[in-house]
Image (tube, helix red, strand yellow):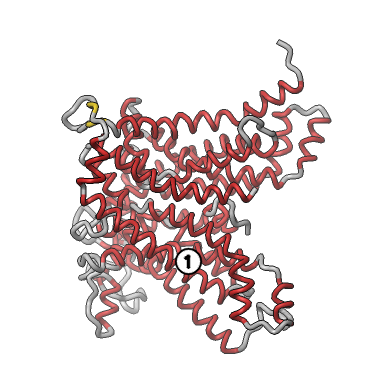
């Protein structure tokens, strides 16, 4: 066989790409396909040696006869909505206030990187101690100024907000720093022209700044939404999904069903329902990444 | 800044005061949990529940927590530290190798049947898959391969989690290089492999470091796969942190010390590549 330059080029480019593609096919796509095939079976790993055909019954049971799944779905949606809206609005307000250069800014940039770089499980356990209803430092400080203790982790009403609060602590700096980068890229001349034309600060923000940074706001919000849906460590660490399952995220329920209770078929079916929800949001995000090119 | 000409940057004294107050409050809120964990790690059990912050003045500091974590329970701590380092190192090395090759292919060559961008977006779409969705098949695959509680299974899982990011960032880094450089090398008789290894790779060295460290941090922090795939031999730092509270009630000093062992290395790494952390977390959507 004669190796022409054109063939050599072709071999080279596929030689570079294929290892990555094959690895992903094998370890990312194959598990998903296996999980899909499992979702049509009944397989209680503890008592059954092999899966039995179960048709669409898993999906029917989850979607129509499992109030816990829907309660968890509701909690997850409320968590994602609250956390991302708070992170975005606080992050935007901070970026708007602090976008000009000042002394020591590099130091603060590094400081704000800490929450997002920390292991989420360490974040969860540090906060678990801080929000402990009896001996946590936050309640100690609250009672020291004469206010009543807050049942951070023991009230079904407060606990979901506690999870949101910790997520806001972890990810608001991310929104802030991302938006700060966007503010830095804003063209100065437009603002000078607007000032010459007598535009007010509010007008400048609404008519110039927001339109210019809104594509980025959409992108980082979608990234945060997708990542917030994966909520697991905070729930695992801070509340263990309690009290009374009020902070049980979908991923936690899937973990319990598939891994703890070893109901592999039902767990796989839940994973796929979860995956489809997330992928529909992701498709929208990906279409934005595609347009970037 | 001397220029009053900058419209965006003009500020009154009141504006500056507001800025300083906001900055101080937000910094305090951000750093408080880490600071509090640090203080607690030097406290006796009895003091750990008090809202006291200044050692020697408000409470008597002790090394009891650190001594317990590093010596008494040291075997488990160092086993998980070693696992964390080994797993993060090898999975990041794999991400770097597969990612830089695929990134180079997609940045430098034209794929006609499947467009370059379609391949890149398909790779990125894997980043959107929730880890919990592939947990059950991963458990079954690793059980079949007899790799449960073996660091190799976690290395594979972490490589898959971080590879999309690696490829996506490497495409960007290679695209930023002038193409003439490798073309000149090829004309001078360099092979494709030679152009890649001797010209392109050294020029994107900062990018390689960034991808490696980002992927190292994400692997170090990853919890759920280790929880499912490792029990005893292959546990990492996050699992040991989670185990610190279950044993005997509320030993805050122990949890705080263990958490800090997980936090300190990644904070140092994040500081080293601070320019790339946001870029990595936004999949390159933001270039600082």
Helix, strand or loop at mark 1: helix
Q: Is residue B211 above or below residue A34?
A: below
Q: Position of residue B222 (x, y in %)?
A: 40, 47
The answer to whether residue B36 is visible is yes
Q: Position of residue A284 (x, y in %)?
A: 50, 50
Give the camera-side residue of A126 and A251: A251
Marked residue chain, label 1: A
Q: Is residue B104 left or right of residue B181?
A: left
Q: Is residue B269 left or right of residue A208?
A: left
Residue position for label 1: A88
Give the camera-side residue of B123 and B18: B123
Q: Residue furthest top?
A: A1
The answer to whether residue A259 is visible is no
Q: Is residue B241 left or right of residue B120?
A: left
Q: Examine the image and state in which quarter residue A171 appears.
A: bottom left
Residue at position x 28%, y 45% in the image: A254
Q: Position of residue B90 (x, y in %)?
A: 49, 37
Q: Position of residue A74 (x, y in %)?
A: 29, 57
Q: Residue furthest left?
A: A47
In the picture, which quadrant includes the N terminus of chain B?
Answer: bottom right
Q: Examine the image and state in which quarter residue A259 appears.
A: top left
In the picture, which quadrant includes the C terminus of chain B?
Answer: bottom right
């Amino acid at each position: 066989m004669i190796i022409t330059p054109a063939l050599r080029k072709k071999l080279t480019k596929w030689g570079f790409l294929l290892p990555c593609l094959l690895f992903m096919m094998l370890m990312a796509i194959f598990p998903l396909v296996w999980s899909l095939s499992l979702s049509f079976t009944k397989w209680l790993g503890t008592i059954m040696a092999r899966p039995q055909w179960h048709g669409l019954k898993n999906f029917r049971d989850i979607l129509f006869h499992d109030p816990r799944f829907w309660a968890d779905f509701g909690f997850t949606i409320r968590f994602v909505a609250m956390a991302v809206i708070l992170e975005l609005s606080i992050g935007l307000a901070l970026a708007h206030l602090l976008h000009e250069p000042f002394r020591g800014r590099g130091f603060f940039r590094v400081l704000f990187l800490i929450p997002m770089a920390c292991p989420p499980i360490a974040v969860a356990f540090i906060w678990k101690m801080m929000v402990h209803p009896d001996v946590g430092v936050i309640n100690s400080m609250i009672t020291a100024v004469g206010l009543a203790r807050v049942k951070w982790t023991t009230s079904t009403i407060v606990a979901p907000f506690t999870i949101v609060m910790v997520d806001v602590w972890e990810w608001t700096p991310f929104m802030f720093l991302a938006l700060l980068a966007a503010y830095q890229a804003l063209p100065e001349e437009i603002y000078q022209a607007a000032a010459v034309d007598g535009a007010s600060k509010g007008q400048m923000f609404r008519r110039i700044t927001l339109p210019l940074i809104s594509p980025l706001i959409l992108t980082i919000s979608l990234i945060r939404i997708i990542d917030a849906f994966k909520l697991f460590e905070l729930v695992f660490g801070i509340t263990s999904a309690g009290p009374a399952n009020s902070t049980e995220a979908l991923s936690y329920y899937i973990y319990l069903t598939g891994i703890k209770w070893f109901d592999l078929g039902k767990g796989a079916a839940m994973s796929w329902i979860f995956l489809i929800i997330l992928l529909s949001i992701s498709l929208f995000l990906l279409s934005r990444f595609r347009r970037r090119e | 800044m001397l220029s009053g000409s900058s419209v965006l940057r003009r500020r009154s004294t009141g504006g500056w005061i507001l800025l300083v107050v906001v900055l101080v409050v937000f910094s305090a809120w951000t750093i408080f949990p880490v600071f509090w964990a640090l203080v607690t790690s030097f406290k006796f059990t009895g003091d750990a529940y008090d809202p006291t912050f200044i050692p020697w003045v408000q409470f008597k500091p002790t090394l009891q927590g650190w001594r317990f974590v590093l010596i008494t329970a040291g075997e488990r701590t160092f086993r998980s530290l070693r696992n964390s380092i080994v797993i993060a190192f090898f999975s990041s090395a794999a991400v770097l190798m597969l990612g830089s090759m695929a990134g180079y292919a997609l940045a430098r060559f034209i794929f006609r049947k499947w467009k370059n961008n379609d391949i890149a977006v398909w790779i990125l779409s894997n980043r959107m898959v929730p880890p919990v969705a592939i947990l059950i098949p991963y458990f079954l695959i690793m059980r079949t391969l007899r790799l449960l509680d073996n660091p190799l299974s976690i290395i594979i899982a972490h490589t898959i989690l971080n590879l999309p990011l690696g490829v996506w960032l490497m495409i960007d880094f290679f695209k930023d290089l002038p193409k003439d450089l490798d073309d000149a090398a090829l004309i001078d008789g360099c092979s494709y492999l030679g152009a890649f290894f001797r010209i392109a790779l050294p020029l994107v060295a900062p990018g390689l470091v960034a991808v490696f460290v980002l992927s190292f941090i994400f692997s170090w922090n990853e919890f759920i796969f280790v929880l499912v795939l490792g029990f005893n031999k292959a546990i990492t730092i996050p699992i040991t942190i989670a185990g610190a509270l279950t044993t005997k009630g509320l030993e805050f000093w122990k949890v705080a010390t263990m958490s800090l062992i997980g936090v300190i290395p990644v904070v140092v790494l994040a500081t080293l590549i601070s320019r790339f952390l946001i870029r990595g977390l936004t999949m390159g959507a933001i270039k600082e």
